[in-house]
Amino acid sequence: MKTLGLLGGMSWESSIVYEKIINEAVREALGGVASADLIIRSFNFADIEHLQSHGKWEEAGEVLARAARDLEHAGAEAMVLCTNTMHQVAHAIEADISIPLLHIVDATGDAIRQEGVKRVALLGTRYTMEQPFYRDALAQRYDLDVVVPSKHERETIHRIIYDELVQGVIKPSSRDQVREIISRMSREEGITGVIAGCTEIELLVTEDAIDSAYFPTTTLHAQYAAHFALKGGV
C-alpha cells in the first residue's frame, strides 16, 4: 500500500471526511484492522483564508508547496490536496515535488464522464466558480460544458460556505437556498449534473436532495486517492 500525504485543514470539517473515506476504503479492501498509511499536514485555515481573501495566491502556493515537500521527505508517495479552491495553486505544488499530485479535477471529471453527463453546474467558493482554473480544466481534459450560478447566487453560496459551513454551522434555510439555485439552473440553463465543488457543500446537500446527477468532490477525490494507495495508480 502506498503512503499518502494529505494537505488538509482547509477546512478541518472536510479534512476529517477525507480521512474517514480513505480509511474505510482501505479497510474494506484489505479487511481486519487495516487502515490507510497517511501523513497529514493540517493548516490553520484562518491563515490560508487570509491569503485567499487578499488575493495572495502566489504566497499561498509557496506555503502549500513547502508543506508538500515536507510530506514527501517524510515518506509520502502521492499528494492529496484536501480542498477544491486551493487547487488554484496545484501547479506550484506539482513543480516542487517529485511524487504525483492526485488532482481533484481528474477524480471529478472521471466520474462525470462515466455518468455520460455533458452540461454541469459548478458550485463552490467564489474563487472556484469565478476563476478559470477549475472550469477550464474540466472543459479541456473532459470536454464538459461547465456552468456557474448567477453573480447573486455565487455570493450566496460563498457566504454560506465561509460564514456557516467552515464554522460547523449547517442551516436548513441555507440548504433550501442551494437547492433552489440548483433547481433554477436545471430549469433555465439545462444542466443535468451538479458538481459540489467545495468540500464543505457535501455537508449541506446530499445526492438524495436533488434531481440532477450529483458529483460530491470530497467523496470522489478521497476514493480516487484510496484507489491509488491500494493499486499504485489511478
Image: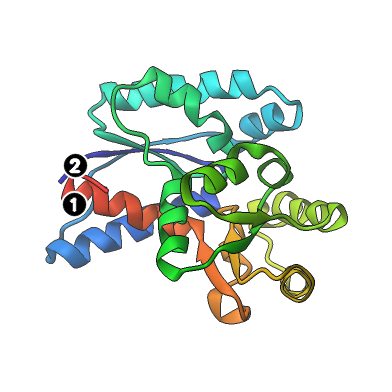
- Give the camera-side residue of 3 and 213: 213
Q: Residue at x 29, y 25 (%)?
A: 72
Instruction: Please give left or right for residue 26 compared with residue 148 in the image.
Output: left
- Give the camera-side residue of 59 and 41: 59
Residue 24 image point, x, y percent: 29, 63
* Disc 2 residue type (three-letter): Lys
Residue 62 image point, x, y percent: 53, 18
Q: Which disc is residue 230 wearing?
A: 1
Q: Looking at the image, is 184 positioned above or below residue 151? A: below
Q: Are marks 1 and 2 in contact (CB under 8 Å)?
A: yes
Q: Residue at x 60, y 37 (%)?
A: 133
Residue 17: which quarter of the image?
Answer: bottom left
Q: Which disc is residue 82 wearing?
A: none
Q: Looking at the image, is 155 positioned above or below residue 184? A: above
Name, please, the residue furthest toward the right.
152
Instruction: Please give left or right for residue 201 compared with residue 109 in the image.
Output: right
- Give the camera-side residue of 234 and 21: 234
Q: Name the residue that disc number 2 marks.
A: 2
Residue 164 image point, x, y percent: 72, 56
Residue 162 image point, x, y percent: 72, 49
Q: Residue at x 23, y 47 (%)?
A: 229
Q: How is the image coloured?
A: rainbow
| Total marks in image | 2
Asked whether the viewer can see residue 85, the reply is: no
